[in-house]
Amino acid sequence: MNGNIKIANLFGIPFYINPSWLVVLALVTFDYGYQLSGIIRSFGPVPWLLGLVTALLLFASVLAHELGHALVAISQGIKVKSITLFLFGGLAVLEKESKGPLDSFLVAIAGPAVSLALFGLLTLLNNSFSLALPLRLVVEILASLNLVLGLFNLIPGLPLDGGNILKAIVWKITGDPNKGILIASRFGQFFGFMAIAIGLLGVLKIVNFGGIWTFFIGLFLLQNANLSAQSVQFQQQLEDVTAADVMIERAPIAPEDLNLREFANNYIIGQKQWKRFLLKDDQGKLSGVLTVENLKTVPTSFWSQTPLTQLKEKIDDIATVSAQTPLLDVLKLMDQKMANELLVISESEEILGLVDRISIGQFLQKRSLASSS
């Protein structure tokens, strides 16, 4: 899974870590170990062990943040494909979008809510008990980090949770989820540019804040906001495209009432060479499949007297799609069914054609060339 390492399953959700997480784990361990060694005035292994514990608890906090999103999504009947920890935090991958803006809002707000709740609980713990100095320092660090994690993610720009919250609000006001994504992406691009600029100014010592991490975070925000904007613009361009528009030209479909000679003349000679043909009955419905190689089992002198049905074979279930199905739904169905092709049918279930990933790609390429000319 993109080089990610599977660690465990949590609530039935596959949990991965990206190799970049190991680098951050080492850096965070060193950073907090060094800070703690100065505060508790110990240069033995204790500060570094505490630094490692702090780093692990920090990532446990990030995991709890992502589980907040995941569990709310699960409560809405949405499958969570995975949770991954990586360089800049975590990512919960959901199977689909929430059905409405309120559900989308609840999924988005759940993560920051968990982080802010952890900040409150850790602060209460520190103020309510007389903890030993090393433990108190670890709890203080974790409390402050959860506060930063919660507030940072509330910045109203994609890909942050605040961007998803903004998307849900715009969706509610306009009734258009794509408009919400586009506006939240624009905000994400703005904050990304701001973070990059602040990071560069910090690196150049022009300002006393920001730095290399701010720069990289800004770059991360900008790249992902750009992807979100491009994705929704792509979807908007395809809103009027249906399965009927992207069907294979001269698809391998033939009526079963032909004889082998008629079939060869009309569908084989001078045509694209298909390995198999779907056959339809006199009502236009799927009746079986013909493997072209099997024509060789019948002498050509008998082709005129041999019906196609003699070579017809049963066919496994093939996924179907209505001719008026939007292209984006066609692509989603292909992914769900793990299918490379779909049978396009009319309302009366008459076969109209086939659509596959190649025909979709060709259609998109033609459309892209037409729009750029």
Image (spheres, rainbow, N blue to C red):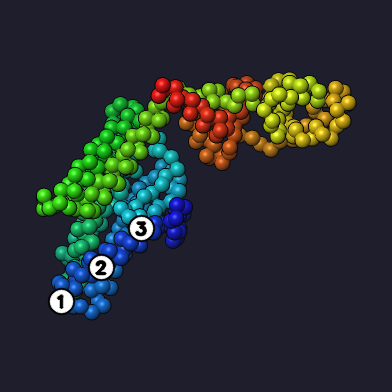
Can the viewer see residue 117 in this picture?
no
Reply above or below: 244 against 224: above
- Percent x, y of residue 222: 28, 42
Q: Quadrant of residue 48?
A: bottom left
Reply above or below: 317 against 125: above
N-terminal of the pair, mark 1 or mark 3, is 3
- Percent x, y of residue 257: 78, 21
Q: Secondary structure at mark 1?
A: loop
Along the line of sight, the residue nearer the viewer: 25 or 250: 250
Q: Secondary structure at mark 3?
A: helix
> Could you say which disc has been placed on residue 20 in the image?
3
Along the line of sight, the residue nearer the viewer: 343 or 274: 274
- Percent x, y of residue 127: 15, 64
Q: Amino acid at mark 2?
A: Phe
N-terminal of the pair, mark 2 or mark 3, is 3
In the displayed image of the protein, which residue is found farthest to the bottom? 44
Can the viewer see residue 335 in this picture?
yes
Give how far apart the Cα atoms at labels 2 and 3 are.
Answer: 16 Å
Quadrant showing the C terminus: top left
Report the mark closest to the observer, 1 or 3.
Answer: 3
> Could you say which disc has been placed on residue 30 in the image?
2
Report the mark closest to the observer, 2 or 1.
Answer: 2
Q: Amino acid at mark 3?
A: Ser
Along the line of sight, the residue nearer the viewer: 198 or 254: 198
For mark 2, does the 10 Å Cα neighbourhood hold few (<14), some (14 to 19), or many (20 or more) residues? Answer: some
For mark 3, does the 10 Å Cα neighbourhood hold few (<14), some (14 to 19), or many (20 or more) residues? Answer: few
Q: Quadrant of residue 192?
A: top left
Marks 1 and 3 close (CB-CB < 8 Å):
no
Q: Amino acid at mark 1?
A: Arg
